[in-house]
Image: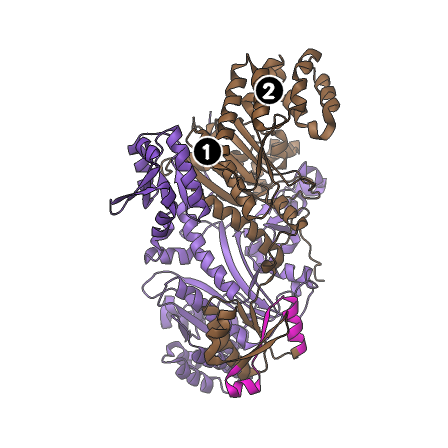
Chain colours: A brown, B purple
Amino acid sequence: MAQKPSIPKGTRDFSPAEVARRNYITGIIKKHFERFGFQPIETPSFENFDTLMGKYGDEGDRLIFKILNSGDFISKVDDITYSSKKSSSILPKISDRALRYDLTVPFARYVVMHQNEIDFPFKRYQIQPVWRADRPQKGRFREFYQCDADAVGANSLLQEVEFIQLYDAVFTELGLSGVTIKLNHRKILSGMAEIIGARHLLVDFTVALDKLDKIGEQGVIQEMKDKGISENAIKKAAPLFSLSGTNAEKLNVLDSFLEGSEIGIEGALELSKIINMLEKLELQSTKLTMDVTLARGLNYYTGAIFEVAAPEGIAMGSIGGGGRYDDLTGIFGLKDVSGVGISFGLDRIYLVLEELGLFPESLDQSIDVLFVNFGEEEALAALTLVSRLRTAGIKADLYPTNAKTQKQFKYANNRKVPFVSLLGAEELKAKTFAVKNMSSGEQISYSWDDLDEFIKTL
Amino acid sequence: MAQKPSIPKGTRDFSPAEVARRNYITGIIKKHFERFGFQPIETPSFENFDTLMGKYGDEGDRLIFKILNSGDFISKVDDITYSSKKSSSILPKISDRALRYDLTVPFARYVVMHQNEIDFPFKRYQIQPVWRADRPQKGRFREFYQCDADAVGANSLLQEVEFIQLYDAVFTELGLSGVTIKLNHRKILSGMAEIIGARHLLVDFTVALDKLDKIGEQGVIQEMKDKGISENAIKKAAPLFSLSGTNAEKLNVLDSFLEGSEIGIEGALELSKIINMLEKLELQSTKLTMDVTLARGLNYYTGAIFEVAAPEGIAMGSIGGGGRYDDLTGIFGLKDVSGVGISFGLDRIYLVLEELGLFPESLDQSIDVLFVNFGEEEALAALTLVSRLRTAGIKADLYPTNAKTQKQFKYANNRKVPFVSLLGAEELKAKTFAVKNMSSGEQISYSWDDLDEFIKTL
């Protein structure tokens, strides 16, 4: 019996229309990465088990897809381990490799391994799939692409400025107006914790603060209480919950609030420098807004942090994010590699563009000109013209068989072909071909020698 | 202790220069795929275990990378199986998924699953990595890209013609002159076996014949003898070992040799039609040559078969190949899906282009203009110009820190930047910038307002 085929949970097939749309997005991202001086690298889909394990916390370790060793893998398990019948003990004996979980750890590994070939400062981008054994749900997949850019090996606020310009350039070209880039600074968060006297509760404080949009001020206060943050501290922090106005106004409130915290003031000063530079340089379509509730989960950020919000009215989480970090490669023994990195959320950007109807119609057009096939001799003449069209850079095709004309036209319609060309017995004799404009219905005849004239109309 | 990082055997990191070169090749292949009316699809990196297993023979099954189930995988193994401690029995209990081994089986699966959305005839291309647990050696990797194009759901020799034109278009644009496309037909091979009376030994016969280049006529004869092919049969086949001349001359010899074998004559007739059409259409730079020793390993080919040989003098196996098949999707329960498919050998094409120095120099140039950083104020002015250059489509960058000028110039040299721009205190005052042509040493000064003039020179 033949198998009824399916694909694994959480994975996707991409149809031609979907690939075209995804490539449209990544093409624009790549183009701007390169204009900004970033260079592409690629790393293997699987890494050594030890390269990945222990880098993403216990939950991460669990979600990493492990690859089974080849051959008689079980024979490598010693009897004592085998008799335990414990997955966690047997795992490292039967799996030496695991699928990439993100692009950051492989990048760190790359920088350490290739440090002598790299010209620092190193601006790299990487667009590759990653895999996570997460429970699949709407918008969450077990295989998905990450689009990352990082600049490492230099320490300058110009880098933050550039990354925000990069976001602006990409979303502007995608036609996505109303995008907001939220900006905060880890040192501001630390300063805030210091001021409210809950320094040791910084993580709890920022995690609670991050939920302001979701659970409201009262919810955040309750969560802070539950986490053991004092009422007094919460009272001190209260003004932060309703900061508003321009970035300059927010920074003013912050400056006076943070007075007394050296680290907090340092963070506020950096942000104000970044914001001032960007005011001079001007963004094209995105809005930059300071957001002290922005915390971002990853603990390795140490400076400015960014998050990109879809245009208002679109129910979608962040469509990008990033920040500055002090130590990319310490885990692999190379110290003092600091940098800034951002990523684009490809799947979410896709959904936003789809919802707003922002994909160009031309993406659906995979053939510019289709020749109808009227039989062997006619087809050969048509193929001569098709070849010339292709050489001229036109996407041209000839229907492969002499099927009923109606069927061939139906195919042309389904493929959204704008021009269908007819070269039948009469045209063969007269050395001409007719071109039908499929939207207007208009039909024009050309001699074979005048193919270039037709090309000009495309 | 920090880990000293490495990557798994048989996998590769690709540096920016390597990615640029690989993208150059795949970019040209993609462009021509699309001009020829092919559409891209993408399938998941891993498939269900049962989708892949049993499709590539025992050796294939062994070489497929299996993914370990998540969580407490061992608990799903029943006690009897567990106590056997046999890898082959335990394997299917702890692995539900496996990494893609080629692009053909996933494509067949895709066609069956999406048959109602696909407009047949379906011309798809797919450029994605595949994984094989093969012993790594020079030019053989455990992760590598396949570049496949197939046209399914129609039956016409025009398709063979098109695929040969496609090879010609790609290798012509890659500047690789002297490429030979070898052509044969499975039915000719069957006919030959029939004529020599060794029909049941067809596979042995073709496998031996395929080694003509490597072990010579005597070696082939010996191998045929060893395989039990009769001396009489081998004598009959002898003229085939030294066929030469034009394709038409070869076909003449073949035609008389195959007299009496219906299937053989059918194959020869098809090839002669294909060759005749291509003579009328003309190839740009590749040479098409009939080669009766061409057999190709895959048993699923049933019609014309192709193989592309690198230019003479380059020690490299085939850099592409393909053929016509009768049954793509029968394994998944969908009958009568026939088609033609070809693939490009990316890694080998890369090596050939490298050996012949055919990669364009421009690929090494990842920044067009680099501004030297002379301090905070100057840098901000420079960044304004850099932003305008980027908006104009130029790859421009500003060195991120105010490092020693010598260091910045060294960086520019390493990155092969053709134009370095200087905007120091003087230029800031005069609202100008200087541009140094790094190959000629010439230096020109522009006012900020005349940036467009500079752009025109790029």
Relative side of B445 to A282, left or right: left
Q: What chain letter is assigned to the residue under label 2?
A: A
Residue at horizontal 49 percent and vertical 76 percent from the top: A385
- Judging by the rendered image, the residue that carries numbered circle 2 is A253
Q: Is residue B455 magenta?
A: no
Residue B205 in view, yes or no? no
Q: Which residues are magenta?
A: A406-432
**Residue B39 at x, y percent in the picture:** 57, 62
Element under disc 1: helix
Element under disc 2: helix
Residue type at mark 2: give it.
Answer: Val
Mark 2: give few (<14), some (14-19) or many (20+) Cα within 10 Å: some
Residue A276, compared with residue A95, is above or below; it is above
Residue at horizontal 46 percent and vertical 56 percent from the top: B26
Rendered image: mark on residue A394? none
**Residue A76 at x, y percent in the picture:** 55, 38
